[in-house]
Amino acid sequence: GRVGLVTGASRGIGRATAIALAREGADVGINYRSHGDEAAEVAAEIEQLGRRAILLQADVSDQESVEDMVARTVEELGRVDLFVSNAAYSDRELMVDCDMEGFRTTVNVSMWGAFYGLRATAQQMIRQGEGGAVVIVSSPHAVLAIPTSMAYNMSKAAIDHMARTAAIELAPHRIRVNILHPGWIDTPGERKFFSEE
């Protein structure tokens, strides 16, 4: 009977999370940026489980788009009780040689995108007055200085501290905030960097 919103939900961890929420009885907002066909497949699977699903195309690095996405979730599904910040982007280059546009995109999606989603959903949960739960999908990159991944490392370290701070600030509203550090997961995002071998 709850409503969840998952960013980056068309593929990988986000897809699995959205479907798992539906299996547990939640309606789900499925955020995606550029994989619309795959997002539609996730929605169809959720609907086969007897739950409602809506497709929410938005670039999480754009604050206004994120706020509109949360408003649409409330308009169409009635509320937001669960937020999973999963969307991420990563270019991998040595810091001294990196393309700064890719570096900034990594930070804008992986750090600012997480913050915009956390802030907008927390505001909605506070308005509802019934608590809620947030999961920030982070990474071991937050604590391991993995070379060629400086922008991603920085972003994940930042969102870990963001989540810890949010947990304290939101506790009086009965909104729980947790950080998830998955190990290496075989997802399309990781396949950009790793061969089958």
Image (cartoon, grey):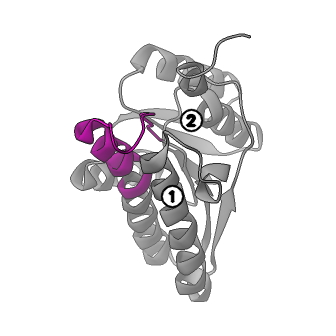
Residue span colored magenta: 88-112
In this view, 165 is above or below 63 = below
Q: Which residue is mark 2?
A: 52
Foreground mark, 1 or 2, reads 1
| Residue for point 53% across, 34% down | 9
Q: Amino acid at mark 2?
A: Arg
> Residue most toward the front?
96
Left or right, 49 with reference to 95: right
Q: Nearer the viewer, residue 190 or 39?
A: 190
Residue 101 on the magenta segment: yes
| Residue for point 74% across, 10% down | 197
Q: Residue 52 lies in what quarter of the image?
A: top right
Disc 1/disc 2 C-alpha distance (Å): 13 Å
Question: Residue 80: which disc?
Answer: 1
Whether residue 126 is visible here, answered yes or no, is yes
Q: Position of residue 91 (x, y in %)?
A: 41, 34
Circles 1 and 2, Cβ within 8 Å, touching? The answer is no
Q: Secondary structure at mark 2?
A: loop
Q: Residue 157 lies in what quarter of the image?
A: bottom right
Q: Position of residue 137 (x, y in %)?
A: 61, 51
Crowding around mark 2 (Cα neighbors within 10 Å: few <14, some 14 to 19, many 20+) is some
